[in-house]
Each structure stands twice: as C-alpha cells, then as structure tokens.
C-alpha cells in the first residue's frame, strides 16, 4: 500500500514501482524546459 494523503491509501501491484516526486519539480516538467529554451535562445 502507498499513502496518498493523510487518510488515503491505494493498492499497488508488485510489478509497479512507486517513485516519490516533489509537487513542484521544474526540471522534469516539459513545459518549463521549453520555456527555458525559448528564453535562452530567442529572447536574448
């Protein structure tokens, strides 16, 4: 079982690996990476 919230739990199959990610992670957000590229290459 994986804790979802304070009182919520979900069943996870044994062949699925659950990885914790912080709620705000710009390095893994594709739109943030695109915006960074645009700022660095076209707005300078």
Image: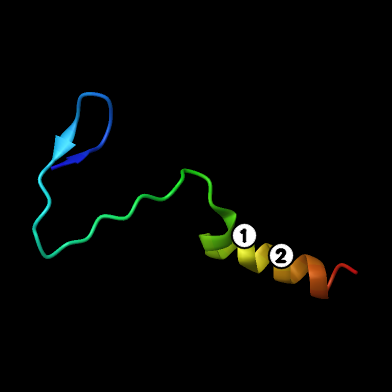
Q: Alpha carbon of mark 2 to alpha carbon of mark 1: how far?
A: 6 Å
29 horizontally vs 21: left or right: right
- Disc 1: CA contacts within 10 A as few (<14), some (14-19) or many (>=20): few
The number of callouts visible is 2
Give the x, y percent position of residue 10: 14, 41
Placement of the N terminus among the 4 image quadrants: top left
Dot 2: element:
helix
Mark seen at residue 32: 1
Give the x, y percent position of residue 33: 62, 66
Residue placed under numbered mark 2 in the picture: 36
Quarter assignment of residue 8: top left
Classify 34 as above or below 5.
below
Placement of the C terminus among the 4 image quadrants: bottom right
27 horizontally vs 19: left or right: right
Q: Residue furthest right?
A: 44
Give the x, y percent position of residue 35: 69, 63
Classify 6 as above or below 34.
above
Quarter assignment of residue 2: top left
Classify 10 as above or below 8.
below
Q: Residue at x 27, y 25 (%)?
A: 6
2 horizontally vs 24: left or right: left
Colour theme: rainbow
Q: Residue furthest top?
A: 7
Q: Nearer the viewer, residue 14 or 25?
A: 14
Circles 2 and 1 in contact, beta carbons < 8 Å: yes
Q: Residue at x 9, y 60 (%)?
A: 14
Dot 1: element:
helix
Q: Nearer the viewer, residue 23 or 32?
A: 23
Quarter assignment of residue 18: bottom left
Give the x, y percent position of residue 37: 72, 71
Mark seen at residue 4: none
- Disc 2: CA contacts within 10 A as few (<14), some (14-19) or many (>=20): few
């Amino acid at each position: 079982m994986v804790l979802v919230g304070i009182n919520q739990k979900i069943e996870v199959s044994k062949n699925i690996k659950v990885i914790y990610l912080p709620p705000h992670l710009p390095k893994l957000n594709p739109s943030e990476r695109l915006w960074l590229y645009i700022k660095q290459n076209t707005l300078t």
